[in-house]
Amino acid sequence: MDQSEGFGIKIYNASPQVDPSLDPSSSQAAPPGRAPPPNGGRKRRLVANGVQKTLSKTSLLANFLPTGTLLTFEMVLPSVYGKGECSHVTTLMIHTLLGLCTLSCFFFHFTDSFRGPDGKIYYGFVTRKGLVVFKHGLGLEVPKDERYKVGLTDFVHAFMSVLVFVAIAFSDHRVTDCLFPKHAKEMDEVMKSFPLMVGIICSGLFLVFPNTRYGIGCMAS
């Protein structure tokens, strides 16, 4: 009976194996499957933590603002700030942006809307005599209800909206670095508690003076 011969195959490594306990550099090597952190990883983590803290403080405050104002501010600010050089032009543009957004917060709290006979929603500006529709000559019968007349609640909401926007805007280091370049540390200390205080005060006032307007970007609470 023929016996089949067995063939043994042995594979050799080109590089010699080194005992990890004897290699001093093995303790500093990154674990398998995980790349070592880049040089700027720590800086990016610090920036991300700062942004997260700002968002956590101001996310609740954004509910008191017209929806388009904060979005416009966050979209335009990076273009205005540019490469981070706070020149005279940059500071002037930041002042202009803050002023326009502040006026937007104040103005839109004096707007309201109603649904016409055709089912469409029409917006207007509340006055002492009633609602003034933005588009004239539509032949609509504007409601004469008392709720469409301006009152103390509208001014409270407008003032609180401006205060909330200032708290959110000054929580961004790009704004404070250009407007208060010599007081960066003091502003950091103030902004740690200022948004929280504004949120508590505004929440209480909005409970006492509930919002009944359905204006442009201002939804009823």
Image (tube, grey):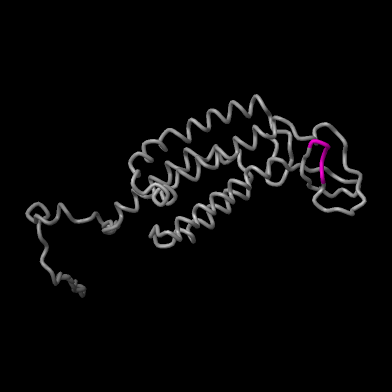
| Residue in view at x 6 percent, y 54 percent | 22
Looking at the rendered structure, the number of numbered marks drawn on it comes to 0
Task: Give the main secondary structure of the magenta stretch.
Answer: loop
The image quadrant that residue 11 belongs to is bottom left
The magenta segment is 128-132
Expressed as whole percent of the image width and height from the top left, the position of residue 108 reads 68, 44
Expressed as whole percent of the image width and height from the top left, the position of residue 31 reads 24, 54
Q: Is residue 129 magenta?
A: yes
Please determine whether, in this image, residue 84 is positioned above or below residue 179.
below
Expressed as whole percent of the image width and height from the top left, the position of residue 178 reads 41, 52
Indicate left or right for 20 with 102 as reference: left
Quadrant in which the C terminus is drawn: top right
Q: Nearer the viewer, residue 48 or 93?
A: 93
The image quadrant that residue 60 belongs to is top right
Quadrant in which the N terminus is drawn: bottom left
Q: Is residue 21 magenta?
A: no
| Residue in view at x 54 percent, y 54 percent | 96
Indicate left or right for 161 with 92 as reference: right
| Residue in view at x 21 percent, y 73 percent | 4
Expressed as whole percent of the image width and height from the top left, the position of residue 6 reads 19, 71
